Image (cartoon, rainbow, N blue to C red):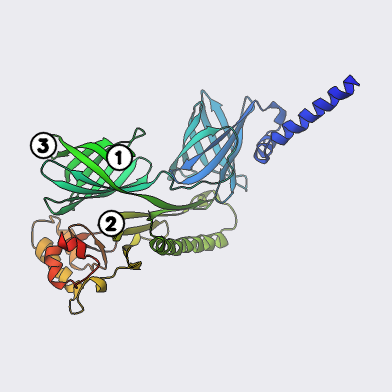
Amino acid sequence: MEKLLLFIALLSFTFAAKAQTSATEHVVFALFEKPDKVQWINHYHGRIDGMSEVAVSVAYDGKRCKGLLTYLRSKEAIQLEGTLKNNLLNLNEINREGKISGSLRGELKENYFLAEWNNVEENLSSVIDLKKVDKEVMTPGYCGENMWIKSFTAQLPEDEMRLIVQSVEEGQLRGIAYSKEEKRSYRILGELDGENDYQLLLQDSEYRKIGKINGTFSDAVRQKAVFTKGNAKEKPMALTLESNLYMGCKEYADYLLTYDITYPKTVNTSFNNWMEQEVDQWLKHCREYSASVREVNPVQKPLMRSSVRAYGWSEIDYYSPELISGYLTYNNTWSLAPQGHSFNYDLQKNSEITLDDIFRKDFEVAPFVLEYLHKKQLQSNWINDPDYKEWLKGRDFPYFTIREDGICFCTAYDGIYGRHELTIPYSDLKPYIKRRSPIDPLIVK
């Protein structure tokens, strides 16, 4: 009787052990000729270039490593095979046709794996940042969880600034700073480390460095920083957090296609729905193009790996409880240059702001902008490059954003010169602006 009970107990333990082995682990074990020789299997979870979410499972039998890389959105899994030597993990991707389609190389640490991915031609690379987990992750998370937009008022001894700072990708910051004393806006380029220490570089429209701000972000409403203008001494800066917005984010990846886009989200449901529609139109275009490529290339060729890529991002020029303004940029591998458009939205009336909402009917905006361009930039030493000046002469300025210091008109993106911006101060525009326009609060300032 005791032997029978022992047999039943061992049998129950065997079934329980098998039940604890996941479907992915069964697949990984089956990749080995002798699955019983597998010494360990580890699970990792993370993102490629901070966006595409993946799960990686790797097993080792003492000689070879084999495993799977799974894109959590598409559920597509790609086989991995390689070696482990002195904690250096070298893995090749094996596609469904049995061909090598890429590689992962990196150092295997105790709790994480930071690797570089390359395609077979080694002309395309990505960073894969993975953390070790107890069990495989099957459900994707939210790609915008560590992204944000913060606006501050910044008090200096002789000036007051308004800052809009947004995290655009891991460790990178972008934004805009408005100086009340100078009545001028500057672009912000910055970096943020793991301790939330940051440095923000302020640049003018010619990309010249004007100054820098150093500090540490926190959840506190009042924060301290230091400001350095040019080569002058550091000055204390007192920051007051005005608003903290979340970022919308959508990502997808499989063997062929990779896309991701980030965009602002406010407490205004109407704006959020409007922005979602704008984003979904772009995503639809990406999916339709990738579908046409798949139709022509039904077989997984190594050269097709991650060959269809698209990225979208936003830049915020102004935000208040009354309105939000910025620019959406779209870039992909099948167009000659990035595309995009500005957005200006009235958060009180729940509607998009157009130039007709701002200016009088008898005012012709386009000729005024071109005349202003010639007087302020083309006929001065503001632009030194003669080729750039010649290019600008034939440009239209179809897009605009609302800023603290004026309305910023900009060209479409050019593959050589990028997107040219021309900010016209409100003082020069005031005679042509309607009464009770959506930008009245800014004109009063």
| Camera-side residue of 1 and 392 | 1
Mark nearer the N terminus (1 vs 2): 1
Q: Quarter of the image holding residue 263?
A: bottom left
Task: From the image, tell me which residue sits under label 3.
Answer: 232
Q: Label 1 vs label 3: CA separation?
A: 22 Å
Q: Nearer the viewer, residue 405 or 241?
A: 241
Q: CA distance from mark 1 to mark 2?
A: 25 Å
Mark 2 or mark 3, earlier in chain: 3
- Number of the front mark, 2 or 3: 2
Question: Extreme top residue here?
Answer: 2
Residue 294 image position (x, y, % from top left):
55, 59
Q: Amino acid at mark 2?
A: Ser
Q: Residues within 10 Å of mark 3 (few under 14, many from 20)?
A: few
Q: Residue at x 34, y 55 (%)?
A: 314
Task: Identify which amino acid the numbered label 3 is placed on.
Answer: Ala
Q: Position of residue 267 (x, y in %)?
A: 38, 56
Q: Quote the CA–CA distance across marks 2 and 3.
A: 32 Å
Q: Is residue 84 above or below residue 117?
A: above
Q: Amino acid at mark 1?
A: Glu
Mark found first going from the N terminus, 1 or 3: 1
In the picture of the structure, the residue carrying the numbered disc 2 is 320
